Amino acid sequence: MAFELIPYESIKNFLGLDGSSINDYPSLGTILDRLLPSFEAFTGREFEKIERIATIFMNEMPKKMIYLPAIPIEEVVSVEAEEYGSVDYKITGYGLRLETGISNDILNVTYTGGLESVTPVLEAAALYQLSHEFNRKEHIGAETVSTEGGTVTYRELGLLKETKRILMPAVHPLKTDCY
């Protein structure tokens, strides 16, 4: 993974592990690899800073606000509408604001955006979610588990409520379905 959410040393210290690398714990690496896509889906953002091409289908209603998932935006290479051609724009905290509303067209935006490095919010959420999933790996998907002392009830699979609360400052400004 190019965008490392949390260094192994932090995981090792938090979970009290003895291994010298994450490779000593294959399930840990598997869990860690799926956290970034889960966080991106919840927040409506793409975190790794790379060049991207976004294709936006513009409907009948003229649109000026363009949602780009990889924020903050560092550079815009081009903004082209298939029928209108080159489009004037302004970079915003949510993506782009077009100078002229565009409708019934396809907008192609080539840009570089995302985070240079992991934020404390992402690292905290990763450590919290990772520790929960790693400690529960033998019973993944189970809702109840019988133990010598009785039964334990687990919540369904997915991000924990606390993980979602931790991630709230990282939610894309135009994503409203996680509140």
Image (spheres, rainbow, N blue to C red):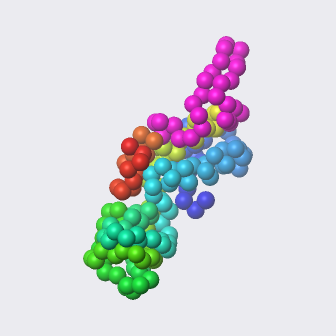
In percent of width and height, residue 130 lies at 58, 41
Q: With 72 as the anchor, is 12 left or right in this view?
A: right
Residue 38 visible within the image: yes
Task: Look at 57% across and 31% down and name the residue there.
Answer: 155
Task: Look at 43% across and 68% down and name the residue there.
Answer: 113
Instruction: Check the image and report above or below for 167 versus 70.
Output: above
Residue 170 visible within the image: no
In percent of width and height, residue 10 lies at 54, 44
Q: With 100 as the anchor, is 132 left or right in this view?
A: right
Q: Nearer the viewer, residue 70 or 130?
A: 70
Instruction: Check the image and report above or below for 53 versus 171.
Output: below
| In magenta segment, residue 142 | yes
Q: Nearer the viewer, residue 126 or 43?
A: 43
Magenta region, residue range: 137-163
Residue furthest to the top: 149
Q: Quadrant of residue 18?
A: top right
Q: With 80 as the anchor, is 41 left or right in this view?
A: right
Where is the N terminus found, in terms of image quarters? bottom right
Q: Nearer the viewer, residue 64 or 169?
A: 64
In percent of width and height, residue 167 lies at 43, 46
In percent of width and height, residue 76 lies at 39, 77
Instruction: Check the image and report above or below for 105 versus 92.
Output: below
Q: With 124 as the anchor, is 11 left or right in this view?
A: right
Task: Look at 42% across and 77% down and name the residue there.
Answer: 105
